Image: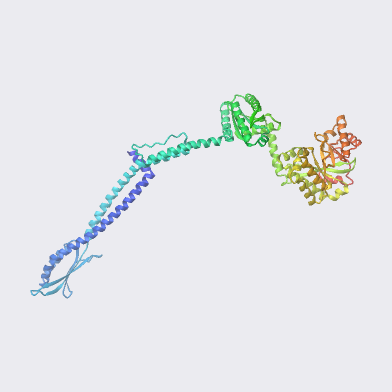
Amino acid sequence: MIKDLVAAAGSRLARRFAAYTIGLSVVIALGTSLMWVYSSYNRIRSDLNKELDQIEHSIKNTLTIQLWQMNLKGLRIIIDDLLLNKNIVYVKLVDEKGRTLIERGRLPPGQGIVRSVPLYYRQVNGKRIYLGKLVYVATIEASLENLKYYFIKTLISWLFFFLFLGAAIQLIYWLSTARHLIAIKDYASRIRLGGYGRDVGQLKLNRSVGGGDELDELVDSINEMHREIVDQFATIEYQSLHDALTGLPNRRMIKRLVEQAIEDCQANNGFRALLSVDLDNFKLLNESLGHAAGDEILREVANRLRALSGSKFQPARVSGDHFLILQNEAVPDYATAKETAAAFAKRLLSSLSEGMTIDGRNIKLSASVGIALLGPESKPDTVLKQADIALHHAMSQGRGQIEFFNPVMQRMTDRQLYLDHLISNAVAEDLLYMDYQPKFCGPERICSAEALARLRDGKGGLIPPGEFIPVLEQTGAIVEIGDHLVKLVFQFISEHQKKIERAGLDSLAINVSPVQFSSAGFADRMIDLARRYDIPPKFIIFEITEEVVVGNIEHVIDVMKRLTSSGFRFSIDDFGTGYSSFRYLINLPLAELKIDRSLVKDITTDSRAQAIVTTIIDMAHNFSLEVVAEGVETKEQFEYLRQHGCDQYQGFFFSPPLSAQDFLTLLQPSGTKRNG
């Protein structure tokens, strides 16, 4: 009982309910008391008036006789008797002329009951003679004192009653309602925490008597709501951690498992493997067979991964055709973990290579696998990143490859990211510029030059073209950067056109990437740039590789004809190294061929190289094409090429690539001499 009283006193709801109840009771009690006081006051006044009427009736005759006889002594006795009444405080007797005969008592400070009694003497013949009047004042102060006493006594009684009533109400409300509401609140709080209360049982109230009232209905509703929340949360949690298509864990779930795996490796000083798997050419299959068939392929792959993994590995689908597979059990050393992962990866590739029938078609898959090993010192994000880096390198090696992560891959990836960042800011930060390597028509005369792109690293160093050009092509930035490089060359020609003309140059060559050449509007952009910088199009030779014409030959021819009709010329770069070299000479509007440096290198020692080079020169001349040999580095190479009719020579035997200023200096009459 004491415990319940303390709990009830601490319950805000019970206190509030008791306060409301007591407040209402106090208002009612005060209203009732005021009505009682008002009623008592009116009753006292009424009783006093009746009493005064009786007094007047009892003394009037005696007072008249004594006044007729002018018996002042008798009059004083009567008046003194009146003042003995506690309610009468003042009496005055006046004669017929208004003179005061007797005056006793005091006038009250406030208002009292003032009464005036006229006195007449009746003679035998019935005639009345006015003798004067009795004036007196009565008050109810004495009765009000008693009324005040009873009112205070009653008010104190009410106060104690209400205090007791409030405590009783608070206890009753606590026992009947408030404690159960608190129990419901605590239960609801447990539902909100820790996975929406999956481990919390049903709500039950400690009620000795239950009558199917609103509290019981509320408990039933909350229990039903709890069951629905738990069920819905389990569904949502499953969906948030699993792939909707395959039912495998998703990236969020596998990351959580990797974190747990690393904790286990730390606890047991063990090692595990994480495999990153990507299906080869899945995008092509998806586009060819349709997305529905693609989804069916992914489901079949997931089923095979489950069957192959068993309890030792955990597969997950993280995106598209990208899967992660985590080794479930740690092994005691790094070498064993690597051996186990390699063996599993081989079985995986073998399983995927087995044919599957999709929409009546027999399909065989291959995949690339990157593997990262994790141990006590590993970090979850780092392991995931390492597995993806290893996968990227496996994919770059061809189909069906397996690669383990090593630090060299990380450095290569970091370098790639650095180049990506550098290239993305190259134009804005003015990191790109052009060098120029002269082309000689003979031992002394410069007749052309090739513009060569250069990239500063922002720290005073240079990035080799063989490193940043592939990045430009892979990212697609080659289109924007390529156009910017053409603009730099045109700007150089425009600014130094007179010097170039005096030097007798008949052309300047610019390399064009296959991606840039195939981009929409390439021809229009080149024509517009030539007009903007007032460059004669015939002065420009675009050097393209055979890779340009491997795709849509009709489109290539259309672009080349549009540009050649404006005056631009084309050269096939690295000629003699591609399987399709001779096939396109008939159809392409070319001006020259450039013999690849790999053939020039061996022409003085390899008869096969000599045969290929002389054949290219004779064939080009038969097609009225000029021939440029690149990579000429010795006098013997130059002499051999000149004897067999080569038109132009480019290489370190004549001049290395030069800065724009050094190239302009070389064009001066005193500087146009072969270097070396």
Q: Is residue 494 visible?
A: yes
Q: Nearer the viewer, residue 521 or 371?
A: 521
Question: Residue 378: which quarter of the image?
Answer: top right
Residue 149 image point, x, y percent: 24, 55
User: What colour scheme was applied to this rendering of the protein?
Assistant: rainbow
Q: Position of residue 138 (x, y in %)?
A: 20, 64
Name of the residue lying farthest toward the front: 360
> Would you identify the image quadrant in which residue 520 lies?
top right
In the displayed structure, 605 sits above or below 150; it is: above
Q: Is residue 410 left or right of residue 307?
A: right
Residue 628 in picture, x, y percent from top left: 86, 39
**What residue appears at the point 13 percent right and 65 percent down from the top-left corner?**
58
Q: Quadrant of the C terminus?
A: top right
Whether residue 270 appears in this view of the structure is: no
Q: Quadrant of the N terminus?
A: top left
Residue 59 lies, with reference to residue 277, above or below; the image says below
> In this view of the protein, which residue sits in the foreground, 211 or 389?
211
At a point 68% along the width and 33% down the height, the residue shown is 281
| Residue lying farthest to the right in this orientation | 643
Q: Is residue 672 left or right of residue 286?
A: right
Residue 42 position by quadrant: bottom left
Answer left or right for 47 relative to 409. left
Residue 78 image position (x, y, % from top left): 13, 66
- Does 479 sit left or right of 170 as displayed? right
Foreground pick, 287 / 159 = 287
Counting the numbered discs, the total is 0
